[in-house]
Amino acid sequence: MFPIKDHHPSGKFPFVNLGLIFTNIYIFFKELTVIDLNSYINTYALVPRNVDFSRPETLTVFITSLFLHAGFLHILSNMWFLWIFGDNVEARLGHVKYLVFYLFCGIAASFGQHIFISNSALPMLGASGAIAGVLGAYLHFFPKSTIDTLIPIFGFPTIMAIPASFMLIYWFITQAFSGAASIVVATASVGGVAYIAHAAGFLSGLIFSLFFTPRK
């Protein structure tokens, strides 16, 4: 299932959400122009075996890695989800709280993934963990909203309006099961997708949103 649009206008201009989208796009195009991409990725992505919690300088990658992406499809899909769901969550939390919330969920998602691959030399990067947190908050704040969703029916793409609660819970279940499968096969990711980070980000967003006082 792929979301097309939601039916719950935010009613407020999403300054922070747009800023996050533009920042991600800017950094992605910077990736395309750096001379030594491997060095750039290894410096700013989260390489689990390089993290030392006794050395604070090695922990900045928990934030910088959230703004890196592995390709056009990676960033396009992430920014599309952020565009659809982020404005509503920002309107409910407020601009500053939303930024803090977004970064917190991204860090929590990366930490959840790191637990299972702490000795890995493969870089972790992407905004999907933070965006998963936004999805968790959207489920909490707008469970009755409807989402126009692209669904393949008998091989034909069909757009249907479905409840946000159904779509997001289904999305979480697929990520959680895929993450559990990746643990069983000792990879913690399948096809380069950090499913555990997605599930951890979603849960952190759902739980953390409970502690925010919604804006009236």
Image (cartoon, rainbow, N blue to C red):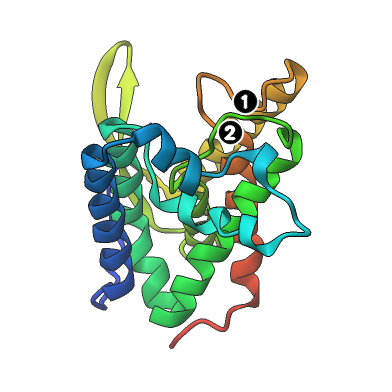
Q: Position of residue 189 (x, y in %)?
A: 60, 26
The residue pinned by badge 1 equals 178
Q: Is residue 37 left or right of residue 203?
A: left
Q: Position of residue 194 (x, y in %)?
A: 56, 33
Going from N to C along the chain, the mark reached first, 1 or 2, is 1
Q: Residues within 10 Å of mark 2 (few under 14, many from 20)?
A: many
Give the Cα separation between the discs numbered 1 and 2.
6 Å
Front one among 152 and 182: 182
**Type of residue at label 1?**
Ser
> Is 67 above or below relative to 88?
above
Q: Position of residue 36 (x, y in %)?
A: 33, 35
> Is 59 above or below relative to 152?
below
Q: Position of residue 120 (x, y in %)?
A: 67, 30
**Type of residue at label 2?**
Tyr
Q: Is residue 106 visible?
A: no
- Residue at position x 66%, y 42% in the image: 50
Q: State which quadrant residue 136 falls in.
A: bottom right
Q: Is residue 49 visible?
A: yes
Front one among 158 and 53: 53
Q: Secondary structure at mark 2?
A: helix
Tag 1–tag 2 contact (CB < 8 Å): yes
Q: Residues within 10 Å of mark 1 (few under 14, many from 20)?
A: many
The residue pinned by badge 2 equals 195
